[in-house]
Image (tube, rainbow, N blue to C red):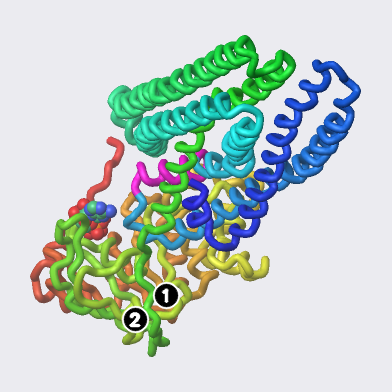
Amino acid sequence: MIRRLFAALGPEHDSALRRLLGLFAAAALLQGAAFVLLVPVLGEVLGNEPERAWPWVIALAVLWIGYAAVNYPAALAGYKTGTNLSRDLHHRIGDKVAQLPLAWFSADRVGGIGHLAAQRVVDIMSVPAHLLRPLVDTCVTPLVVVLAMFVFDWRLAVSMAVAAVAAAVTFRMAGRGMQAADRHADAVHADAAGRIVEFARAQPVLRAFGRTVEGHTALDDALTAQHTAGRRMLRAGMPGIVGLGFIAQASFIVLLALGTYLALDGSLGTAELIALLVLAARFVEPIMFIAELGGAVRVAQNAVDEINALLDTETLPESEVTRQPDGADIELDEVRFGYDGTAVLDGLSMRVPERRMTALVGPSGAGKTTVIKLIARFFDPDAGSVRVGGVDVRRLPDPTSLISAVFQDVYLFDGTILDNVRVGRPDATDEEVYAAARTARVDDIADRLPGGWDAPVGEGGSRLSGGERQRISIARALLKDTPIVLFDEATAALDAENEHALQQAMAALSRDRTVLVIAHRLHTLREADHIVVLDGGRAVEEGVHDELLARDGRYAHYWRERSRAHGWRLTSV
Ligand SMILES: Nc1ncnc2c1ncn2[C@@H]1O[C@H](COP(=O)(O)OP(=O)(O)OP(=O)(O)O)[C@@H](O)[C@H]1O
């Protein structure tokens, strides 16, 4: 356990943990030695010349002072190491999460990370802060007592050694059951956490369709499983607690009986017997305690394994040889990509010319969003290559400095409008943030809301409409000022004012940049310099609007459908 903990936490925590182990071992040795000294002290006090106990009493006092002197810094060091570990683990989990490919994130994994950061880090932190100390005590103190007992009486010492071995074997066996139960409980906790995230996220949909009961069922099942797992944990802990309790009581009774027999036999004096029984009580005490400790140790072991598993998760490979791009055009060359083995792009080749607006159209599910995500390197293609400025995105030194993405489902943080625009470039001056926000017509939103620029947007931007959220996202992209912008246009119907503001914001963003837009609006298609029609995982048509209309193919059909739908209006009679 200690070795695994050392390995998991990395060499930077080695010296702190070693020092801690040294301090705890010294405290346990001093404590064990003090217990042993009780034998001569009691022997002399209960003997014929009690004054002969003084030297032993003084030695005992010195040991206790030494123990207190080591114990205090040891306890402090335990807490300090625990809090350092927790801070470090949170940072490492955070860094890892920031590097994981976006394909990795699913509701249960998001819930799992929450559980890992909140509960599992505390489980590990409790090792140096609370567990290591009693663990070292329960190993070292009885060992000192058993060794000392050999000096006083070998028969009692052998009985103690047998009890110690039985306790160690039971501890190991009980710990294994507990570890399995904890693994199961942890998987169930992570699942329940994922279900809660999913349930919260799905509220609008569940309510819109009046399906709150069905929505509860999955969560209820997960919570019931959690409850059952908790009971299984309790059951798994019982054999250890009962078994070790039995060993502790039985060994004390054996020591008592043996001691009495030896006293009656004349091999032991009464004073000696009392003193040795006090020592036996000190030996038995930690055995009772170790059962609870065993469960906590196994839980911490699982926590170490889980955090290791997350930290070992593969991230997208970083190329050692990087190249600066030559320009800002984008090219997809024979790209193949699928989710979980289901092909979406089937040898797609297309070009997005530099400083032009290219519109991507195609039926729902054709893979338009997937194309954007591959360019932004949310994941890598299964085959083929995505190039920016002639360089494969896997070999770009810093793709995020070249590319901004504006998605439909814009996530806003629960802060002010201004804070949310600043996300685009945290070190921007206030003037730069205001300028980007005004260009994206975010000032209209600030004017409308009480609090203006400092108006809170609500969690996820819940106080704003879809179009408004997208304008804030455009402002972020303007502030970031990258040569390439990937844009997934809002599909939702917008009111005339929002539509106009969004068009203006987009026009500002498109100026002098390479823009690839998933176009849903007729206006965007008319304005585009280049149009790519995606279907069946390939580019089936490419060209400009008039040319494609004249060709009367897939695009012309799409355009007519969209125009017809656009022409429909509900009017009052
Ligand atoms: N994370 C994912 N896991 C599994 N399948 C996915 C995932 N994302 C998308 N897909 C599937 O990949 C296909 C292409 O999805 P994509 O979102 O790229 O299409 P799209 O053309 O943008 O669709 P739309 O116009 O409806 O947004 C769809 O069949 C979709 O169900």
Please give the residue where the numbered disc 2 appears in the rendered image. 388
Q: Earlier in the sequence, mark 2 or mark 1?
A: 2
Q: Quadrant of residue 549?
A: bottom left
Q: Quadrant of residue 274?
A: top right
Q: How many numbered circles are shown?
A: 2
Tell me which residue sits at (60%, 65%) in the image.
426
Tell me the amino acid under the disc marked 2: Val
Can residue 447 be seen in this snapshot?
A: no
Tell me which residue sits at (62%, 9%) in the image.
264
Q: Mark on residue 141?
A: none
Quadrant for ligand 1?
bottom left
How many residues crowd around disc 1 within 10 Å: few (fewer than 14), some, or many (20 or more)?
some
The stretch in magenta equals 106-119
Q: Position of residue 160 (x, y in %)?
A: 54, 27
Q: Position of residue 457 (x, y in %)?
A: 55, 47
Tell me which residue sits at (20%, 55%) in the image.
340
Callouts 2 and 1 close, C-beta under 8 Å: yes
Magenta segment, principal secondary structure? helix
Tell me which residue sits at (68%, 43%) in the image.
79
Q: Nearer the viewer, residue 318 or 375?
A: 318
Classify residue 102 as left or right of residue 162. Answer: left
Q: As displayed, is residue 51 above or below residue 382? A: above
Tell me the amino acid under the disc marked 1: Pro
Q: Position of residue 390 (x, y in %)?
A: 32, 86
Q: Nearer the viewer, residue 297 or 192?
A: 297
Q: Position of residue 522 (x, y in %)?
A: 27, 63
Tell me the distance, in whole angstroms, between the alpha carbons under discs 2 and 1. Answer: 9 Å
Decide whether residue 252 is among the magenta residues. Answer: no
Please give the residue where the numbered disc 1 appears in the rendered image. 399
